[in-house]
Amino acid sequence: MKYSVRGWSVMLACAAACVDRAPRPAVSVAREPFGTTAKGEAVSVYTLKNAHGMELRAVNYGGIILSLKIPDRNGRFDDVVLGFDSLADYIRSSPYFGAIIGRYGNRIARGRFTLEGRTYTLATNNGPNHLHGGVKGFDKVVWDVAPFERPDSVGLVFRYTSPDGEEGYPGTLRATVTYTLTEGNELIFDYHATTDRATPVNLTQHSYFNLAGDGSGDILRHVVTLNADHFTPVDSTLIPTGEIRSVSGTPFDFRTPTPIGARINQDDEQLRYGRGYDHNFVLNTDGKGGKGGTGGTGGEGAALTLAARVYEPSSGRVMEIYTTEPGLQFYSGNFLDGTLRGKRGVVYGHRYGFAMETQHFPDTPNKPAFPSSTVRPGEEYRSRTIYKFAVQR
Ligand code: GLA
């Protein structure tokens, strides 16, 4: 079903009256069925297109981005995100491919935290720790969805109300996540939430990228720049120790463009614990990388910072990440080990994708010195992240 169509079909409808107002190719949103969950909930896939041919397909199960087609330096479009062909595959076992993560992205130590004098117990679904919202996090629920079209952008508004106590978290959390595809080849994520009891909130997006094309090999030649002078070292279960450590002189120094593979196999305790990169970077907010007002609907509170730039040399594709969040989890796909078959049956080998998860720091509910992730009644949780795509010649 087409929600609306502009461009050529409109021109046909208005025939001669329109010929000297020849339209540009259209932005559009289309919807098709994408199966049903075990509980019988209908899932739909939405296809968003901009006038430059960039195309995003996403479903209302977990807000999962199924595919993202962007041009290389020769104008060739490839899908640059990992995923599966069917809903059943996502439901069976997905390492969070393309999904919205909540209530709390990343880990909470031992699945416990204390807030306003009460101790809460969460699922320990990652060794001894709680990961990505628990057994049935926001990546596994069916969201209400409303598509929209504006003159220069197209998008989807996902809404989900998480009941008080869901996955052990306090308070009814009303979450809204908006995906906007702009004419500037930006993909904007706006997160909003309110609660009726104090609760930790840390929403993010877990797309895995390979800018050379999904399934085309490992991501080790991607050249990464991170606007971070510090990172949060972890223990062997990937819980931050609390230290804010300088990246200087470590394999975590990405302040100048460096291939992911350049140091990933060095004999370094942190790389051993992460099996590669799986660490939170403390983003510099000194204005160095700040972005003045481009993209989408305008500011959402905290300033947008240029967090990361990723360049893939064979295709020339570039992804820049701007965010209002204080942290970024750079994950180099270390848990991909060749056991998952993705789209078109491609085997996802070791490090076939990377994720850049903008976030508050892991285990913040147990780390009072970290920027707070608590949202209280009457407050609004707001967060914005922009993935901007371009090419370098
Ligand atoms: C995040 C975590 C990783 C891993 C992936 C999913 O990036 O930090 O350790 O759990 O999600 O596999």
Image: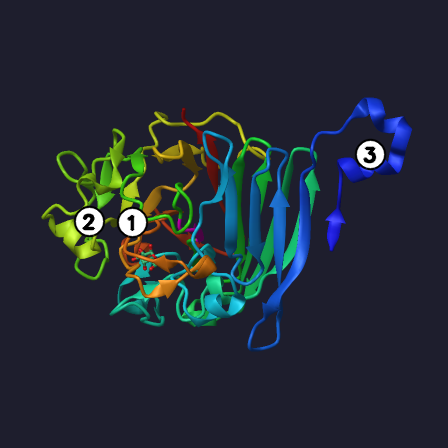
* Chain-order first, disc 3 or disc 1: 3
Task: Report which residue position mark 3 lands on.
Answer: 11
Q: Quadrant of residue 338?
A: bottom left
Which residue is at 47% across, 65% downward? Answer: 90
Q: Position of residue 299 (x, y in %)?
A: 53, 34
The location of residue 16, given as percent across then percent down, is 90, 28
Q: In screen coordinates, is 127 left or right of 307?
A: left
Of the residues tagged 1 and 2, which is closer to the observer? 1
User: x, y (%) of residue 116?
Assistant: 37, 62
**Name of the residue lying farthest toward the left:** 267
The numbered mark at residue 302 is: none
In depth, the one of 172 and 209 nearer the eye is: 209
User: How dense is the environment of label 3, judged by Cα within 10 Å: few (below 14), some, or many (20 and up)?
Assistant: some
Return the residue at label 2: 233
Q: Residues within 10 Å of mark 1 (few under 14, many from 20)?
A: many
**Along the horizontal axis of the image, is 232 left or right of 154?**
left
Residue picked out by circle 1? 332
Amino acid carrying mark 1 in the image: Ser
- Residue 60, relative to residue 184: is it above or below? below
Residue 207 part of the magenta segment: yes
Q: Residue 106 location, x and y as percent?
A: 34, 57
The answer to which image quadrant residue 286 occupies is: top left
- Reply yes or no: does residue 166 show up in magenta: no
Where disc 3 sits, the SS reads: helix
Q: Which element type, helix, strand or loop, lies under badge 2?
A: loop
Q: Going from the N terminus, do you reach mark 1 or mark 2 first?
A: 2
Provide the residue span drawn in magenta.
203-208
Question: Helix or strand or loop: what does disc 1 sit on?
Answer: loop
Q: Residues within 10 Å of mark 2 (few under 14, many from 20)?
A: many
